[in-house]
Amino acid sequence: MQITTEAVKELRTVTGAGVLDCKKALQDSNGDFDKAVEYLKKKGLVAAAKRAERTAKDGMIGYYVHMGGRAAALVEVNCETDFVARTEEFQNLAHDMAMQVVAERPLYLSREDVPPEVLEAKREEYRLQIDPGKPDDVVERIIEGKLEKFYAETCLLEQTFIKDEQMTVKDLIAQLVAKTGENIRIRRFVRYELGE
């Protein structure tokens, strides 16, 4: 199958992947654009997982002040080099993460940061909401489903990205990791609101 330069260029525009990666993705998917996009997403997630262990000590602090100055957030976003930290995409990520914190009010960075006592209290709360006649395995599945929803609401990395409801914050970061070739992570955040 003949892969056109226009198809490679369009795939590169959509995914941000390199020219050779786009060409290979199109060849491997027999020219199917959607399959090529999916292929590159999976490849990017695998690459991001490999880079997760590398030290990220550079970066920047993103900030956002909501209109009227009633709410604001600071977010420390790290990468491996100042070269990446100075890119427009990285700076946009830091700003978007601060905006995300103001808008969605996460309590924790990741599910691993949720204290065990909070999880246990949530499990008990959910257990009390379930009909006592249900089998134990069904009750556990319901509780796990409710906990997933809890994580998606309260953990920054699990939240749906406010600018694209098709991806989570974690997915957004993984895309930038794949594009830059560096480990990128959110180290910490703080949210302020007038009167709180």
Image (cartoon, rainbow, N blue to C red):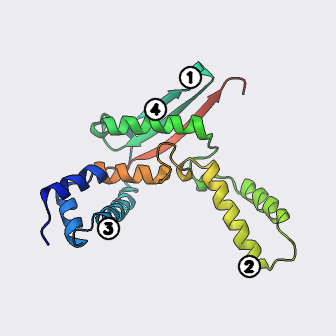
Comes first in the chain, label 3 or label 1: 3
Which residue is tagged 1? 67
Q: Quadrant of the C terminus?
A: top right
The residue tagged with tag 4: helix, strand or loop?
Answer: strand
Dot 2 alpha-carbon crowd within 10 angstroms: few under 14, some 14 to 19, many 20 or more: few
Which residue is tagged 4? 62
Which residue is tagged 2? 137
Asked if the residue under mark 1 is in contact with the one under mark 4, i.e. CB atoms within 8 Å, the reply is no
Q: Quadrant of residue 90?
A: top left
List the single residue furthest toward the top: 68
The residue tagged with tag 1: helix, strand or loop?
Answer: helix
Dot 1 alpha-carbon crowd within 10 angstroms: few under 14, some 14 to 19, many 20 or more: few
Q: Is 85 left or right of 97, judged from the image as shown?
A: left
Comes first in the chain, label 2 or label 3: 3
Amino acid carrying label 2: it is: Asp
Which residue is tagged 3? 35
